[in-house]
Image (cartoon, rainbow, N blue to C red):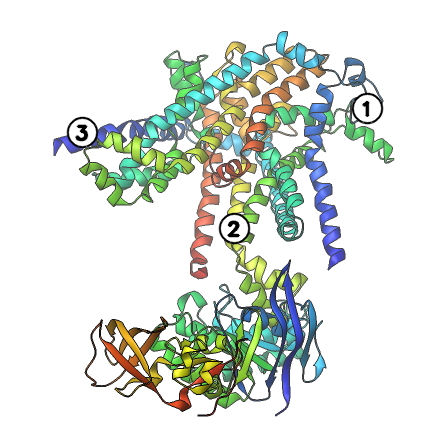
Amino acid sequence: MTARLSLDGVTKRFGTTEAVRNVSLTLHDGEFMALLGASGCGKSTTLRLLAGLEAPSAGRVLLNGRDVTRDSAAARNIALMFQSYALYPHLTVFQNIALPLRMRGLSAVQRLPGTALVSPVVRKRQAQIKAQVSQVAEMLRLGDLLARKPGQLSGGQQQRVALARALVREPSAFLLDEPLSNLDTQLRADTRDEIRALHRRTGYPFLLVTHDQSDALSMADRIAVMIAGEIVQVGSPKEIFHRPQSIAVAEFIGHHRINLLPPGPAGRLHPAGTRLWIGIRPEDLRLSPEGALAATVESRAFHGEETILKLRDDAGTALRIVLRGGETLPNPGDTVRLAANPAALHGFGADGRREDIPA
Amino acid sequence: MRLGAVISLGLIALGAVMVLLPFVWLVSVSLKPHAEIFTTEVALLPTRPTLANYWTALTETDIPRYLLNGAIVTGSILVLQLAVTVPAAYAMAHRRFPGRRLMFGAVVAALLVPFHVTAIPIFLGFAQLRLLDTYAALILPFMASAFGLFLLRQAFSQIPAELIDAARVDGMSEMGIAWRIAFPLGMPTVIAFAIFSVTAHWNDLFWPLIATTDPGLATPPRGILFFRDQESGDDVGPLMAGATLITVPLILGFLLAQKRFTQGLANTGLKK
Amino acid sequence: MRNRALTDLVLAGPAALVVILFIFLPVAVVFVLAFTDYQVGARSANWIGIENFATLFGSRQGRNALLNTVVYAGIVIPASVGLGLLVAMGLHRLTDILPRLSAVLRTVYFLPVAATLVAMAVSWQMLLHPSLGLINTWMSVLGLAPQQWLSDRGLVLYTLAAIGIWQSVGYNMVLFLAGLATIPTALYDAAAVDGADRGWSRFWTVTWPMLGPTTLFVVIVTAVNAFRVFETVATMTKGGPAFASDTIVYALYREGFVYFKAGYASAITVVFFLALLLLTALQIMLVERRVHYR
C-alpha cells in the first residue's frame, strides 16, 4: 500500500495550548481509516490540518509523497464533508454540487453569468460539469432533487448532497467529519452501510473522524485512537479492541468500561498480576464457584438482553460484570466468586503501557 | 494577504478620522477664543484653549433652558409611552380578547406610518384645542408608539404562559402581572426601546419646529437654531459650545452603555 | 365575563385609543385634506380634486423637490450601504487580530448615529464655511479651489448627500456586522475546500449571498431615512439657495407650516407616504421570493 496523505510530526498550537502534539499519521491508497477520540481531543483539528484549513505550528503534511504543508485547501484537492454539511443555502442542489467544479474548471471571468452565450469553451466546460454532476447525483439518488434548495431537504438528503459535493471532483482523499452525528438511529445504520458501499465503489481513501467507537469499529479498516492531542494507537478494529496498547485505550474502547485491578490484588487472576495492572472486560468475567476472585454484589441492573452487576472485591476494587443468559442471579449483599478466561486478560505496566502476559 | 489587511486597516482608520472630523471641530471651535475663530489662518485645534464660550453659553444664553426642556419632554414622552404601552402589550401577548388580532394587525400597519405623515392633522387639531406652544403639544402625539407596542408585545410573548398562570393562581391582578411580571422580565427590550425613544425625541427637530414658536419651550435642537438665528454670526464660539452641550448627554450615554445603545438603535432603526 | 372584558379594556383601551387618535385618524384626514384647498386657520375649504397633485408634479418647484430627493437618495443609498459593508467586513476581520482597535473603530463609526444631528449640522456648517471653515483651508493647502459648499446651487445637494452618508454609514456597519457574525464558519471552510478560498471568489460564494437578507434590510432602512431627509436641510440650507436643496419633507414643512397651505402640504404628504409604502411593498415581495433561504 502506498501512502496517500500523511502528517509527519505535526504539532498545532492555539496560543499556549497544544491542540495536537507531534502527530504522525498515514492514510493509504484505498483504505478506510477512522480517527477516533473523545470530543475536544484534537481530532477535528487534525482533520483541518489534513484538509489545509489550518497550518501546522510544526511538522509537515505530505500528499502522494509531496510536501503540501503550505498549500491551500483547494490546491490539495482533498474532499471534506462537514458535520453541519455546510451546504450553500442560496444555491440549488445542482449548483451546490457543481460549485467545486466551477471554481476549478472556469476562470473568474468565465464564471460571470451569460458567458456561455458568448464562448463555446465555456459552453463545453459547462456541459462537462453538468454530466459529472448528473453522474454523482445518480449514484447518490439525488436525481430528482437537483432543482431544490437545501432548506427543502430532509437531513438524510442534505447529507447525500454534502457527499455528492465532496465526491464530484474526484478528490485525492475524502475526509468525513462526524458524518453520522446529526442522524437518528435508523438512518444512522443505513448511512453506515451507504458510506461503506461508497468507499468500495469509489476506491478513494476515506478518513472518518468520529467520537463514536461503534461507528469506527464497524466501518473502518484501521483505527487511529487519539487522546489529549496525541495518537496513542493505530491498528485494525480487532487489534484495538483485543490488544489495547495502553490503559487509556483499554478504558476508552468497549461498550462497558474495562475492570482494572491494581498490582498485587491482581495476582489472584494471573501470576503476572503481582507486579502488573490487570484489565478484564466486564463481558469476560463470569460467575463461578471455583473463581479466584471473591467479591460482594453492590447493585444489580437489568437491561433486557443483559444484566450488569456492580461488585467490590475484598481488596476494595470496584468491579463490573455483564451477564447474558439464564444464570440464577445473585442479590445485592451476596458474596460471589468470579473467574476469567486467561486469554482475555490484559496486562499493563506501571507506566500504563501494555505488557503481554502468557495466557 | 498581510498587505491587504494593512491597506484595509489604513482605509478604515482614514474613514474613522473623517467620521470624527465634525466632532473634533465642534469641540475645538467651542474651546477657541474669539480671535482664533475669526481668522483666515484656520487651524484644526485651538492654540490657546479657553472655557469662556461654555461660560457664555451657560450664563448668557437659554442653553440650560433648552437642556431642561429636552429632559422634560423626552422624560414625559417615555413615561407616557410606557404607561400606555406596557399593559396593552401584555394584553396582546397573553390575553385572548376579541379584536386582539385586529389590534396587532393595526399596530403593524401603524408601524408603516412615519410621524411626518400625521403632522398636519395633529397640528390642526392642536390649534383647535389651543394646545400649540405648550409642553403638551410636544409630548402628547408621541404617546401612541406603534413601535413600542410591537416591540414589547414580541418581548412579552417570550414569557412562558405558565409563569403568567402561576401569577394568576397566586392572586395577582392583570395590571399587577403587566407591571410586576411582564415589565421586569421584558426589561432588556424596555431598555432598548427607552434608548431609542429618548434618542429620537431628544434629537427631533421636525415636530418642535412645527408645534412651538415660544423659545421658552424649545427642545435642544430647536433651541440651538433659535440661538443661531438670533445672533448675527458673531457668537460662533458660544454657539459651538451650546451645540456641544446638547450633544454631550446622548454621546455620554452611548459611550457608557455602548452595547445596549447600539442594540437599541440598531434593532429599532426602522421607525422614527 | 363582563369583568374580563372590562380588564381587557383597561389594559388595551388607552393604547388603542391613542393609536387611533394620533395615527389612523390623522392619516385619514391627510388623505381627505390632500384633495382640498384648505388653508390653516380658514373657516372653510373647497374640493379641488387632484389639483394639489397636479401642482406638485406639474410645477417646476414641486418637481424640483421630488427630483432633489431622488438624487439625494440615489447618492446616499448605494454609497452608505457600500461603505457600511466595506467597513463592516474590514472590522469583522480585524476583530480576530486586534479586537481592541476594532471595538474603538466601531464606536467611532457609530457616533454620528447617536449624536444630535442638528448640533452636528451646526458643526458641519462651520467646517464648510467659505472663509472660516477648515475644509476650504485644507483645499487650498492641497492646491484646490475653495468651494461655496452650501451656497453653490450646483454643489449644495451633493454636500448634503455627503453629510447624509457620514451620518448613516455607522448604522449600516452595525447591521452588516451583525449579519456577518451569523455566517457559519463551516461555510467558509467548505468554500475553501471547494476552491473559493480568498478575496472575490470567497466573497461571492459565501459572504454576499449569506448577507442577502441583511443587505435588503439595510437598503430599505437607508432608503426610508434618505427620503425623510429634513434636519440637515432645515439647519444648513432651508432648501436654498433658490430651492437647489429643497426636498420632499422640507417642502411639506415649508408649504404646510410656513405658508400654511394645509391642502397642498397634505398632497405632498400623501405622495411621500405612498412612496415609502411602495418601498415597503418591494421589500416584502423580495423577502417572499427568498423565503426558502433558511
Amino acid at circle 3? Leu
Residue A161: x and y in percent read: 47, 75
The residue that label 2 is drawn on is: C214
In the picture shown, does residue A133 fall above or below B180? below
Q: Residue at x 42, y 55 (%)?
A: C288
Left or right? Give the position of A316 relative to A243: left
The residue that label 3 is drawn on is: C6
Depth order, front residue of C16/C75: C16
Secondary structure, mark 2, is helix
Q: Mark 1 lies on which chain?
A: B
**What whole-number distance in Å separates the C-alpha atoms at marks 2 and 3?**
43 Å
**What whole-number distance in Å separates the C-alpha atoms at marks 1 and 3?**
68 Å
Looking at the rendered structure, whether the residues under marks 1 and 2 are on a common chain is answered as: no
Counting residues from the start of the chain, the first of labels 2 and 3 encountered is: 3
Taking the image as drawn, is residue A138 in sight?
no
Depth order, front residue of C16/A20: A20
How many dots with numbers?
Answer: 3
The residue that label 1 is drawn on is: B42
Residue C42: x and y in percent read: 42, 14
Amino acid at circle 2? Thr
Amino acid at circle 1? Val
Q: Which chain carries label 2?
A: C
